[in-house]
Image (spheres, grey):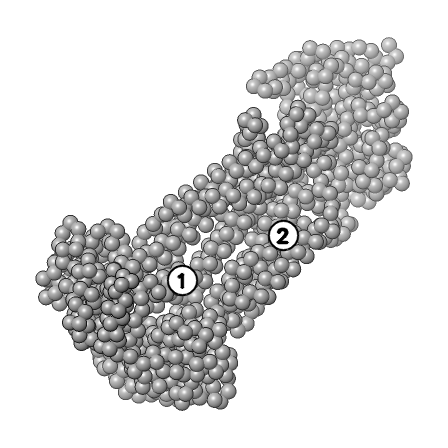
Amino acid sequence: MRLLLRFGLRHHRRHPLQTLLTLLGIAAGVALLVAMQTAQRTAERAFDQALATVAGNATHTVTAGPDGLPVAAYAALRRELGGRSVAPSVRLVARAGSGETLGERTVLRVLGVDPLADVELRPWAAPGGGVGGALPLGELLTRAGSFVATPAVLARLGVQRGGELSLTIGGRPVRAHCLGELPAPPAVAAGLDDVLLVDVATAQEWGGRPDRVDRLDLRLDLAADRTAERERALAAVASHCGPGARIVATGSQQGGLGQLARGFRINLTALSLLSLLVGAFLVHETMRLSVVARREAFGVLRALGVTGGQLARAVVVETAVLGLLGSLLGAGLGAFAAQALLQPLVRTLNDHYATFSLQEVRYEPLVLVACVLVGALVAMAAGLAPAIAAGRVTARDVLVPARAASGERRRPWARIAVFAAFAGLATALLTTVGTRLVQGYLGTLALVLAAVVVVPPAMGVFLRAVGWLVRGSGPFVRYVVRSTAAARPHLGLPVAAMVLALGTTIGMATLVGSFRDSVAGWLAQVLPGDVFVSVPGGHDERALPFAPAIVAALQAVPGVAARTEYRRTVVSMRTAANPNEDEVDVVGVQPTVRWTTSFPLLQGDDARGRAAIANGDGAWISEPLAFRRGLRLGDVLTIRGTGGPVALPIAAIYRDYSNERGEAIVGASWLQQHLPVPVTALSFEAAPGVEVEPLAATLRAAAASADTQAVSVRVQGELRSSSLQVFDRTFAITGVMRLLCLCVAFVGIYAAFAALQLERAGEIGLLRCLGARPRQIGLVVLGQTALLGLCAGLLALPLGVLLGHVLAHVINRVSFGWTLVTVSVPWRALGEVLVLAIVAATLAGLQPAWRFARMRPAEGLREA
Amino acid sequence: MPPASVVSLRNVHKSVHEGRGSRRVLAGVDLDVAPGEAVAVLGRSGSGKSTLLNLIAGIDDVDEGSVRTCEVDVVQADERQRARLRSERLGFVFQAFHLLPTLTVAENIALPLELAGVARSVAEPRVRELLARIGLADRALAWPDVLSGGEQQRVAVARALATRPQLLLCDEPTGNLDDAASTVVLDLLHELRRAHGAALVVVTHSAATAASCDRQLQLDGGVLHGLVAKGS
């Protein structure tokens, strides 16, 4: 076995280009997997760690609507339960720095706590609870606007003890004074990587709510024999905090970022696995060619007494070695790439899921090892078929020329059966997907495998058609076409890999293009006003209210025909199907006629449904909310108001691309009655004859003169373009992946063709003997690769369109809960992909063409 | 004044690489072949016979010496000029036939004509003529792999003579054939080359093939020795 292995590994060493390309194929796939998994897990763990750190040792959390809890409730509970069992907190999002746009400034989280109450709940925030120093308690409690932060945060902000920091909180400028470092243990400091710790009074002032806190954290004894005591404590909480308060055990809260962004995460993982799949094609092809090249040697080995099993095992080990080396290389590359991917990923997460910041990747050895193992196992699986083929070589094969024996026997019925099986499986999985995203991807994989099976015979049909087209040409052109067809057994899989990569590109273009068109059309319907005013910020800042003075000033601006008020908040909601309370975004709307008639309703689009918001006798829920919770028209939402739970029937379901978790719209009057929420956004319809830009300028000036709070005033077109910018940014990551898939497929074509040309050196030498010039030899090779590229491009078109529809109607729907207004064929993308295929394949043939044009005829003849 | 030689080699030296070292196979070879003359080159396996043919055709390079083929200084010629020499003035017949498997019989014969830039209106009648001469007119559209060895070699001979070359180079043309087929191929080879006035240099182990030529040479120790000239 040792000599067998040496024989095998030397073969790969003697074909360094092929071997390198195999390694790069696996490396590219593993690199993408490592980069995506590392970046995602860094973001998720950092976010979850931050949540856990801030929650500290709390056993329960008390929240109550957008206005939070009164300080008086905290004071009463503190007297009743004891100062160490309950602690308040106020949480704000702040931005620091001098960037022109919000996105350019550093995102920070402000945590306001009562250090004296946090001794047991958050010891690191309490006096004497730190390491290496004491919390400057006196100054923190007495000096308004002062903060502490971990050394890492201070270094990043470039501020030291005694320094000042300019922040923007809720649109308002704030000056913060640095008291120095937060002396937290390293494990805790990691969860406070973007936190400014302030006294709760400072946070209340910065948040504009001096007598409210966001939540109360409780530490209750969970011992089994303390149940009665615990129940009494919870009853006291309910009594003091009112029926609008919600008490949740810490462990039962909604999952962290991984749960929030589950669809996003699965989609990115699927795309990175796709590139690994394409790399696996490469490994399969290279190993298959190496087995074909060594067929005669294998026959000799069999004649010497080596068994078929030993040969097969040797090939498996070779593949494992190559796979492991490629995976290790990929892990290294991926570790570098993770850092580059981190900020775009965090930005997308900030746009859609949660506002936080993150600076550096955290590498997890287990993740790296797992990705390396996945890469090696995928490579081994890809090499299995060639290993089996090697094991089947007999001593008799020594007498049979390798080329003649390597032609695959045609088994059309077997291929049809396999295609039918995969196509049937794909149909079954995709038509019964429900809400199971993994099933959707498995169905897509079955679809892809069905396409791969059909590529070789489709190539045959294409090449026969081309052969018919050139039947009137001279023998040289016919030779180019027919020799390409003769090489089909060698080239079927690399072309299939290229078809897969190109088809994925078309599919993604179909999805992204259709999605973009749907979003653009939807924006015009859902924001019918001419000017839209809100407080700028990311996902966690969407419910920031206006200062009352600004609302009054904006409402007084002349030249306005109608005005829509929005009051956004997060409420606790349950339904009959889901009796556990969950947090849901709710927007109270005081609509205009135009808003009511133009809003895009999918169900309940009748007079009663449309009037429900204005009348306050029904709710509209977004399509994702309906999909995720299995809700229908007529189902009842139970929302926790200040006075307790309130029921509201669902009157309509509307299209919404802004929030994949789903949200509900209710009448503003109804909302104010049950859960007072300040105005968070306004849209204005210009009066006839009033120009929109001057109106926007007037609104801007009115807001600026009324309060220091910064507001965002955008006209319709500007709002649409900034929304689409967010969209484009979100899908930028998929663009990188598409490019990498194409590169891997290109490498596959190049490797397969380079290997094939090596086998055909004899034929090339013969052509040289017959008088073919170097240029003509080059044209043979380039002609063949261009033909393959054209074939791959044409075969990719129907696959890509089909994949696009699957992505749009199934994957997109199950991931995010929404349907697209239109799914259209991206004709321009089809044309681009076809050209790209021909160019890429021709480029893949450049080096072999150059090599063979320069080859001495005698070298080729020796191979003949 | 004697006519210019079709092949003229002077003091040709050539070594071939074997593993880490090299072995000299031609050590000062001189050779002249007159127009229309048939010369057989005999020698042991590995004596350099095929190498000699490759040097004459310009598909390999000499280490030392001069090679003139069909009035072209092969040593000084660049690759384009050598390719042109091979396509317009030389014909090759190999022991293993080496027909292109993805071209029909007729197309294999037509290929050198196309490579030489001959118009189709001229090439097609030429191909038909050659097919008739080799007795395979009814197999024009057949693929090479359905032909017998003798038939394949006949096609190879026709291909080699398609462009009416001045010189025919044959490397063991009957090496893979039985006696009967060898006789047919040999007769055809001489008939066609005489009809075209082509000279012939044939490398062979076959006594019959050697005897059919005007002159026999032995390649031994890297040098050519004269054996028998017909008529002597």
Does residue A649 appear left or right of residue A796 in this picture? left
Whether labels 1 and 2 share one chain: yes
Residue under the point 20% across and 75% down: A73
Examine the rendered structure and indicate whether residue A324 appears above or below residue A605.
above
Examine the rendered structure and indicate whether residue A635 appears above or below residue A132.
below
- The answer to whether residue A93 of the structure is visible from this angle is no
Examine the rendered structure and indicate whether residue B128 appears above or below residue A135.
above
Image quadrant for the C terminus of chain A?
top right
Residue under the point 40% across and 89% down: A615
Q: Nearer the viewer, residue A656 or B216?
A: A656
Q: For the residue carrying disc 2, how many other residues have a C-alpha within 10 Å: few (<14), some (14-19), or many (20+)?
A: some
Q: Where is residue A234 in the image (x, y as percent from the top left)?
A: 26, 71
Residue B46 image-quadrant placement: top right
Question: Which amino acid is tagged 2?
Answer: Val
Q: Where is residue A355 in the image (x, y as percent from the top left)?
A: 32, 64
Q: Provide the secondary structure element on which disc 1 rests.
A: helix
Residue under the point 29% across and 59% down: A52
Please give the count of numbered marks on the rendered protein: 2
Q: Where is residue A29 in the image (x, y as percent from the top left)?
A: 49, 47
Q: Residue furthest front?
A: A225
Q: For the residue carrying disc 1, how many other residues have a C-alpha within 10 Å: few (<14), some (14-19), or many (20+)?
A: few
- The answer to whether residue B95 of the structure is visible from this angle is yes
Q: Please name the residue that numbered disc 1 is placed on.
A: A259
Q: Please name the residue that numbered disc 2 is placed on.
A: A452
Query: Which mark's residue is nearer the viewer, 1 or 2?
Result: 1
Cα separation between marks 1 and 2: 34 Å
Image quadrant for the N terminus of chain A?
top right
Which mark sits nearer the N-terminus, 1 or 2? 1
Question: Which amino acid is tagged 1?
Answer: Gln
